[in-house]
Amino acid sequence: MRLLVSGGGTGGHIYPALALIERLKQVEPDTEVLYVGTTRGLENKIVPDAGIKLETMHMQGFKRSLSLENFKTVYLFLRSVHHAKKIIRDFKPDVVLGTGGYVSGAVLYAAAKQHIPTVIHEQNSVVGVTNKFLSRYVDQIAIAFEAARNQFPEEKVTMTGNPRAQQVASQTASTFSWEEYGLEDDVPTLMVFGGSQGAPKINTTVVDAIPEFNKRPYQVIFATGQKRYDNVKKQLQGVKIGKNVKVVPYIKDMPAKMPKVAALVSRAGATTIAEVTALGVPTILIPSPYVTANHQVKNAQSLVRKNAAVMITEDKLDSRSLLLQADKIMENKDLRAKMAGASRKIGHPQAADELIAVLHKAINEH
Ligand SMILES: CC(=O)N[C@H]1[C@@H](OP(=O)(O)OP(=O)(O)OC[C@H]2O[C@@H](n3ccc(=O)[nH]c3=O)[C@H](O)[C@@H]2O)O[C@H](CO)[C@@H](O)[C@@H]1O
């Protein structure tokens, strides 16, 4: 298969695409892949690191208020569509997959206009602006939350789950050891991160909680987000960090590490949710209030309703509320087992295979 993939800006759009590509190369080894991203997004690092060819385009989002900048955005969009058409003519894909972000809007729109089979993957329970726009033009739509179904033309929709779920679920016998972080393998581990880019409020809350975490019988690995690390280090001046607590900018190769955590504290981004439900990781979700239509709360509720996670809304978040929930889960193995079982029931560990089937459907029925 010649597959053109586009999705960018944030890890939540990129990791599902990479997971799909990895699986496709396993089952169809002669697959050729080209990735199209933005010049500024996280894809510039993650995609080449994964050994995938990347082409970039300069884009920007719409401002909510009427602004001159929007004319520039429209100009950049049209220029990107033109650029995308050229990339498509050169690469000659059998199918084009979009995983969200402005860049996928231009690429998928260009592909549809050139009569190439197209598929979009929506990771969230509330459909993103780009995918909403593209839903009229594409052949097939894959979703990861049932709640997304009725926001799209029904006849195009297939529930696949998020391919990243299969990638973490199929991770076997990893040689990863917590000793790499100066932590221990036989102590239960609480992992904390605020989405792929970190979250200031979660960071300050964890900084405040560190003197207490130091005294706990469990260990904590805390990722601040690459760009927020220096700021957190400043906040940590004069704070004693125990041997059981490790602060890092970013955790690489999550599929090797997540199976080895006892519980997670995180934003309620869709890809994180796909990962924890594939593995059955008990989770404390702190939805970002800064996302479109408050979609992270809806993402979180789908787990909370099934007792797979607890939620702390950002307005209630402080070191006290965080420690209360963390202690409750980390100091009670039975509760963790119950939450893990409930979480696994929601997961889609075959999501990549199911999305591959949708790609073939788009090719065959085009
Ligand atoms: C602020 C914002 O717009 N967030 C959106 C963004 O989330 P965002 O990209 O932040 O979050 P997601 O939860 O979807 O994905 C985060 C990914 O980063 C990984 N990770 C995280 C920390 C770390 O140190 N190392 C690491 O590898 C996680 O394992 C996960 O795979 O896209 C998601 C998917 O469309 C949406 O649901 C989110 O609402």
Image (tube, grey):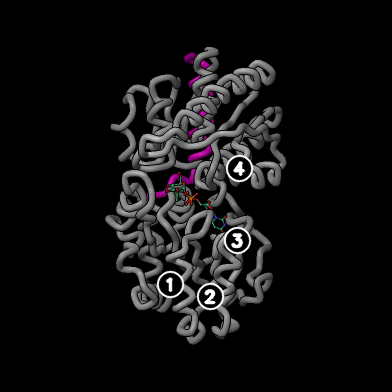
110 over 273 or under it: above or below: above
User: Considering the numbered disc 4 on the image, is that residue within a helix, a strand or a loop?
Assistant: loop
190 over 114 or under it: above or below: below
What is the number of the mark on residue 307? none
Whether residue 358 can be seen here = no
Say if disc 3 is inside 8 Å of ligand 1: yes
Q: CA distance from mark 3 to mark 4?
A: 18 Å
Q: Nearer the viewer, mark 2 or mark 1?
A: 2
Q: Nearer the viewer, mark 4 or mark 1?
A: 4
What crowding class fits label 1: few (fewer than 14 Cα within 10 Å), some (14-19), or many (20 or more)? some
* Residue with the mark numbered 3: 250
* Residue with the mark numbered 1: 205
Give amino acid for label 3: Tyr
200 over 60 or under it: above or below: below
Q: Nearer the viewer, mark 3 or mark 2?
A: 2
Viewer-proximal residue among 292 and 179: 292
Viewer-proximal residue among 244 and 357: 244
What is the number of the mark on residue 235? 2
Q: Which is nearer the N-term, disc 3 or disc 4?
A: 4
The dominant secondary structure in magenta is: helix
Q: CA distance from mark 2 to mark 1?
A: 11 Å
Q: Which is nearer the N-term, disc 3 or disc 2?
A: 2
Magenta region: 346-366
Residue 243 appears at what percent x and percent y?
A: 60, 83
Quadrant, the N terminus: top right
- Seen at 55% across and 78% down, the residue is 236
Q: Which is nearer the N-term, disc 1 or disc 3?
A: 1
Give amino acid for label 2: Gln
